[in-house]
Image: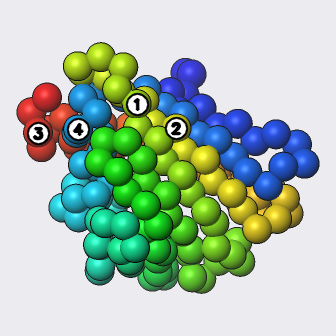
Amino acid sequence: MEQKTKVVAETGKQEIVITRIFDLPIEHLFMAYVEPEIIEQWMGTKVIELESKTNGNYQFETTDPVGNKHLLRGVIHEIIPQNKIIRTFEMVSMSFGVQLETLVFEKLTNNSSKLTKKVVYQSVKERDENLKLPFKQGINWAHQRLEEVVNKLLKV
């Protein structure tokens, strides 16, 4: 089965570009990234802090399959509703360092929208190490879950 979320990682570059078309209005897709209750459901994580504003902070806590807790945190550098989020991302317990993420939201129709997420790692080596994990399957699963949760919550 073809995965809906596309991940492009060009050889020798320290970035990846992730794209997905969602069967969701842009307002609902954007909410999935700024509303704690929605984030907790589709990411399966606990939102400790989320200031969905320019210069806001966020902290999430997640638990892996063997029960280890992991802290995810960052700073939101810019947020433009239904348009863009620029933020840092760090998984404290992992060796990938801080990443810079730019999420661009694009309205396609009244009931569909596109997310383009560019992730820049501190080095090509860090990016390549991350891609050795089941990253592509995980992001596809997460995006599928996002669409299901938002459709159910907001009765699209």
SS class, disc 4: helix
- Split into 4 quadrants, where in the image is the N terminus? top right
SS class, disc 1: strand
Instruction: Residue at 84%, 59% (x, y): give it.
Output: 124
Tell me if label 3 and label 4 are in contact, CB under 8 Å: no
- Split into 4 quadrants, where in the image is the C terminus? top left
Asked whether residue 26 is in view, the answer is yes
Q: Which residue is mark 1?
A: 106
- Hey, what amino acid is under mark 2? Thr
Image quadrant in which you'd find residue 37: bottom left
- Provide residue 141's location: percent of width, then percent of height: 45, 43
> Which callout, 1 or 4, points at the residue further toward the start of the chain?
4
Q: Which residue is mark 4?
A: 27
Which numbered mark, 3 or 4, is in the foreground of this view?
A: 4
SS class, disc 3: helix
> Which callout, 3 or 2, points at the residue further toward the start of the chain?
2
SS class, disc 2: strand
> Which callout, 2 or 1, points at the residue further toward the start of the chain?
1
Asked whether residue 141 is in view, the answer is no
Q: CA distance from mark 3 to mark 2?
A: 22 Å
- Provide residue 82's location: percent of width, then percent of height: 31, 42
> Which callout, 2 or 4, points at the residue further toward the start of the chain?
4
Q: Which of the labelled discs sits on residue 154, or is there none?
A: 3
- Provide residue 149's location: percent of width, then percent of height: 23, 43
Q: Residues within 10 Å of mark 2 (few under 14, many from 20)?
A: some
Q: Which residue is mark 2?
A: 116
- Hey, what amino acid is under mark 4? Glu
